[in-house]
């Protein structure tokens, strides 16, 4: 971001994907040269902590242990001492040829996306923490990490396609996979605008 040199202070609001229900953060920055602000979010309390580090910051590189390092530990030590956890991650590639979206995503559902996101309450338990929108009927239900009412709704109605308010992903219960399709982009963009402005 280009900031005019005469600017003495700046107010910035940071928005996030809300995978952990993190609220926006407002930063009021007084310029005295370069500024580093350390942000930490606690998903258990829903609270951000901020520390102004001034114009200098120390970056620490933490080396990752390789699997071969753990395998080199003698068997007798491995039995008495738990191995160091290995840092891992994964990515999800959505399925592009789901045969169900055309029969389960109804015309006009896009008009229900923004009002559903504003309400964002599970129809069954009223929870607002992590919900999915059914793209057949437009009702909102909580995820498996809450009480699993989205899956219950699928079993009761056979409505297969749902949209996540948390990360904007689309799930097909019949494929049992995340899906994407050119015709679903408008729905995702509508939710993105409702969520992030």
Image: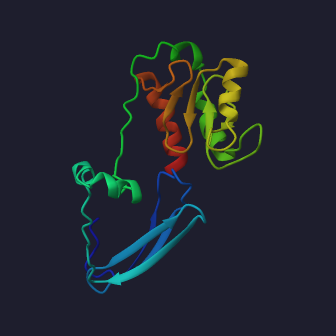
Front position in the image: 93 or 164: 93
Question: Where residue 134 appears, x then y in whole percent?
Answer: 63, 29
Q: Is residue 27 above or below residue 42?
A: below
Q: Is residue 64 left or right of residue 85?
A: left
Could you tell me residue 141's position as x and y percent?
68, 36
Q: Using the rendered image of the protein, determine whether residue 96 is visible from the camera's viewpoint.
A: yes
| Residue in view at x 64 percent, y 50 percent | 129
Which quadrant of the figure has residue 33? bottom left
Find the residue positioned furthest to the front: 76
The image position of residue 146, as x and y in percent, is 66, 44
Question: Quick check: 85 left or right of 114?
Answer: left
Q: How is the image coloured?
A: rainbow
Measured as percent of width and height from the top left, residue 68 is found at 22, 49
Considering only vertical position in the picture, is 10 above or below 97?
below
Residue in the picture at 45% in, 22% down: 183
Image position of 106 (left or right of 14): right
**At x 29% / y 64%, what residue is drawn?**
1
């Amino acid at each position: 971001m280009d900031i005019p040199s005469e600017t003495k202070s700046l107010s910035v609001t940071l928005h996030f994907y809300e995978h952990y229900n993190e609220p926006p953060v407002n930063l009021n920055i007084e310029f005295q040269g370069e500024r580093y602000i350390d942000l930490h979010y606690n998903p258990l309390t829903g609270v951000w902590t901020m520390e102004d580090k001034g114009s200098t910051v120390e970056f620490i590189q933490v080396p990752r242990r390789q699997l071969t390092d753990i395998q080199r530990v003698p068997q007798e030590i491995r039995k008495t001492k738990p191995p160091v956890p290995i840092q891992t991650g994964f990515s999800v590639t959505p399925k592009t040829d789901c045969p169900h979206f055309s029969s389960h995503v109804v015309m006009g559902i896009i008009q229900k996306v923004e009002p559903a996101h504003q309400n964002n309450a599970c129809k069954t338990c009223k929870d607002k923490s992590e919900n999915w929108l059914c793209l057949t009927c437009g009702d909102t239900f909580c995820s498996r990490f809450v009480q699993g009412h989205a899956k219950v709704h699928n079993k009761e109605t056979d409505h297969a396609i749902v949209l996540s308010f948390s990360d904007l992903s689309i799930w097909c219960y019949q494929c049992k996979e995340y899906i994407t399709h050119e015709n679903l982009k408008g729905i995702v963009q509508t939710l993105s605008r409702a969520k992030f402005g």
